[in-house]
Image (cartoon, helix red, strand yellow):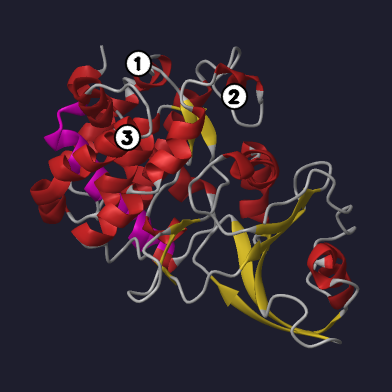
């Protein structure tokens, strides 16, 4: 179930009214009509709004009992940020053009379309409940970490080293002319991050962040290949875990940061923030080895030494994300707690791996 290349035109304003739902689900309804919808908000995303829609039809049992609808955020600042970062465009294009050619588990996509200008979009997805959303603040168990990492080779291996991905301007945002954009953006946001959170950030993490601000060009300029499709925000809030009695595969959602980049960045980002430091230290090497073994089993030539070096280096990416994202989206109480936890965990991770030593 994937969005076809010729999806119907987006309504003038993305909506979940009965007519729109009937139109976007037409390929599965065999002429039936959606007659009622009950809507509930779901998720913790700050860049877009997600709704679970329970559906009724004029012919019972015709279509899905429920779907998940993704719409622009109700917060103007988040929409402005999403347009500037092309976030909505990226996610729509991921479901339309990349997801069908990957083996990572994602919800099936009934519809994905975006209006000119990039501020209005509509995505209608399979509802994978009773899977439960991970909790970035609580962290996860080592067993849950293994389940999550098991999905990464299905994302990375199918297009590993595929240079044609670099031709997709919405995916490859590190092409000619982008040099210095990330350093300038993060440096511009960093003073606000410090002002807002300095009392809650560990002193050693703030010291690392100061060093990193002076070396952002080095981090941004040297990213060894091969590159592939990456998620860019592979963390617990964007993972849906199956109940114990169900199939043991995690569903990966929220593809607004998908990019063309090094696969190890997703792995390091996930382990840096999703496990609390004591659990990460105890299981880190085995978890990275599980990814390595799965990649090799998928036919990818990847040495352990190269992977481990890249894994160390990209541990800095999580701290960069915590600094930038916290300043770019709608501020919420949970968001503050999440960004503080991310900064402290990622900073500790990068410090323990001596990641700054690799920026030469």
Disc 3 and disc 1 in contact, CB within 8 angstroms: no
Q: Is residue 290 left or right of residue 91?
A: left
Give the residue pinned by disc 3. 297
- Local packing at callout 1 (Cα closer than 10 Å; few below 14, some 14-19, many 20+) is some
216 lies above or below 40: above
Q: Where is 203 relative to 219, above or below?
A: below
Where is residue 195 shown, x and y percent of the image?
Answer: 36, 47
Range of magenta residues: 335-355
At x 38%, y 60%, the residue is 336
Q: Secondary structure at mark 3?
A: helix
Identified at 43% across, 33% down, the residue is 157
Mark 2, secondary structure of its residue: helix
**Mark 1, residue position:** 218
In space, the residues marked 2 and 1 are separated at their CA atoms by 24 Å
Please tell me whether mark 1 sits on a helix, a strand or a loop: helix
Q: Position of residue 226 (x, y in %)?
A: 42, 19
Q: Are marks 3 and 2 in contact (CB under 8 Å)?
A: no
**Residue 1 visible in the picture:** yes
Question: What percent of the width, then of the height, locates residue 334?
Answer: 40, 66
Q: How many marks?
A: 3
């Amino acid at each position: 179930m994937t969005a076809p290349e010729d999806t119907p035109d987006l309504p003038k304003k993305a909506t979940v009214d009965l007519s729109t739902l009937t139109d976007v689900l037409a390929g599965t309804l065999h002429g039936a009509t959606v007659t009622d919808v009950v809507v509930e908000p779901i998720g913790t995303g700050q860049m877009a709004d997600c709704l679970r829609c329970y559906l009724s039809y004029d012919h019972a049992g015709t279509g899905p009992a429920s779907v998940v609808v993704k719409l622009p955020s109700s917060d103007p600042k988040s929409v402005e940020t999403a347009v500037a970062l092309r976030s909505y465009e990226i996610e729509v294009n991921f479901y339309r053009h990349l997801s069908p050619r990957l083996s990572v588990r994602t919800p099936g996509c009934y519809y994905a379309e975006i209006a000119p200008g990039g501020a209005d979009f509509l995505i209608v997805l399979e509802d994978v409940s009773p899977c439960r959303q991970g909790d970035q603040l609580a962290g996860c168990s080592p067993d849950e970490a293994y389940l999550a990492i098991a999905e990464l080779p299905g994302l990375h291996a199918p297009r590993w080293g595929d240079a044609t991905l670099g031709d997709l301007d919405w995916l490859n945002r590190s092409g000619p002319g982008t040099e210095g954009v990330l350093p300038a953006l993060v440096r511009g946001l960093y003073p606000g991050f410090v002002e807002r959170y300095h009392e809650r950030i560990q002193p050693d993490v703030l010291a690392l962040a100061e060093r990193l601000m002076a070396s952002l060009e080095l981090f941004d300029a040297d990213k060894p290949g091969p590159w592939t499709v990456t998620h860019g925000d592979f963390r617990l809030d964007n993972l849906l875990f199956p109940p114990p009695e169900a199939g043991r595969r995690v569903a990966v959602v929220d593809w607004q940061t998908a990019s063309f980049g090094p696969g190890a960045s997703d792995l390091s980002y996930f382990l840096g923030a999703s496990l609390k430091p004591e659990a990460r230290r105890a299981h880190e090497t085995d978890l990275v080895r599980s990814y390595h073994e799965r990649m090799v089993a998928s036919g990818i030539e990847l040495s352990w030494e190269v992977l481990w070096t890249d894994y160390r280096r990209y541990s800095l990416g999580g701290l960069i994300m915590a600094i930038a994202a916290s300043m770019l989206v709608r501020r919420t109480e949970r968001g503050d707690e999440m960004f503080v936890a991310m900064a402290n965990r990622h900073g500790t991770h990068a410090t323990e791996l001596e990641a700054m030593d690799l920026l030469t």
